[in-house]
Image (cartoon, rainbow, N blue to C red):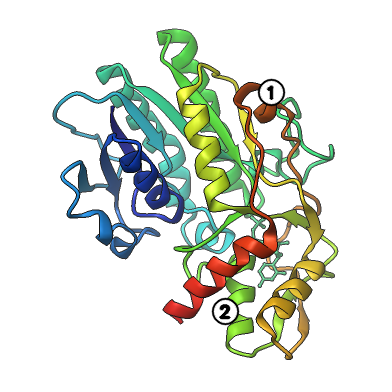
Amino acid sequence: MRILVTGGAGFLGSHLCERLLSEGHTVVAMDNFVTGNPRNIAHLSDNPRFQFIQHDITHFIHLDGALDGVLHFASPASPIDYLKLPIETMKVGSLGTHNVLGLALAKNARILFASTSEIYGDPLEHPQTETYLGNVDTIGPRGVYDEAKRFSESLMMAYHRAHNLETRIVRIFNTYGPRMRLADGRVVPNFVAQALRGESLTVYGTGSQTRSFQYVSDLVEGVYRLFQSDFHEPVNIGNPDEMTILEFAQIVNEVTGNKAGIIYKDERIKGDPQTRRPDNSRAKTVLGWEPKVKLREGLVDTIAYFRSVL
Ligand code: UDP
């Protein structure tokens, strides 16, 4: 298949490009480098089945030749990024999704959209199943990301219903691994970089808020299986091993041997979700997928990566 990956130079996009190439597909990666980085795909440039196009998908997308599939992963994804880039975030998740859907329709290509656990907002149901409708503050600082992703899901379903387009929606929970940006502000790069520098880890709020962390290879496997399936309803892909942010900080200090401890800071952004954990039953039933990589295993490669870029 010839497959377009929007956000192809990003953290997840670049890992997906690699996986698609290793499965024998031809890949067109597209990115405008707002949060992506050419370094993430530099090692793919010699592959004759890999092509890169620098383009902002909020503008009309020209692509010559046949296209069989699209993985739509373009968007700022870190809370710090979308606070800095609120309008870009809303545009890529609305105009961008519309353009990508228009391209998929014109080429009769299957399209998979990277949605997020953030569509559940600060959830009142725990763990989150795909049937939970969410608790999002439309006008809060996180609303630009959450609502753009929700709009995109609706637009995907509209194209599916109106045009019978083959659509897939993955709801991605917190994912980490090599090629995350050191300074993207998320908890994994922050804590690992602080630990490697021998600094105290900055816990925002009380640290009692929970998350669960999925290693990137598990995410890539889930996305690839969903893309190949015929299932058009949303599927959660995440690791259910939930912990408090304080517990996570203690693990990072332990595995890095950091003695500098923890310092508490004010809540970073109003409306920080207090709990988050995927219910993966659907992914298991529909895709036969379950996460495999334990946190302490995934942290080994991640720490080595951050050490190499510090
Ligand atoms: N967090 C923290 N210290 C940091 C960065 C993040 O305590 O240096 C917390 C943040 O407040 C949130 C959680 O870690 O509760 C996860 O934040 P992240 O930015 O990784 O992603 P989110 O899940 O909020 O989208």
Is residue 300 in sight in this rendering? yes
What separation in Å lies between label 1 and label 2 (alpha carbons)?
Answer: 37 Å
Residue 47 horizontal side relative to residue 22, left or right: left
The amino acid at mark 1 is Thr
Query: 48 and 41: which one is in front?
Result: 48
Which is nearer the eye, 94 or 293? 293
Assess disc 2: are there few (<14), some (14-19) or many (≥20) residues with their C-alpha within 10 Å of its C-alpha.
many
Q: Nearer the viewer, mark 1 or mark 2?
A: 1
Left or right placement of residue 47 versus residue 293 in this view: left
Q: Position of residue 60 (x, y in %)?
A: 24, 34
Residue 295 coordinates in the image, percent (x, y): 68, 60
Q: Would you name the residue on which mark 1 appears?
A: 285
For ligand 1, give the image quadrant.
Answer: bottom right
- Report the residue at 61% width, 66% height from top: 299
**Which residue is under mark 2?**
193
In the rendered image of this protein, does residue 217 appear above or below residue 25?
below
Local crowd at mark 1 within 10 Å, few (<14), some, or many (≥20)?
Answer: few
Say which amino acid is labelled 2: Ala
Across and down, in percent, residue 290 comes to 66, 38
- Cβ at disc 1 under 8 Å from ligand 1: no
Secondary structure at badge 2 equals helix
Q: Residue at x 78, y 75 (%)?
A: 250
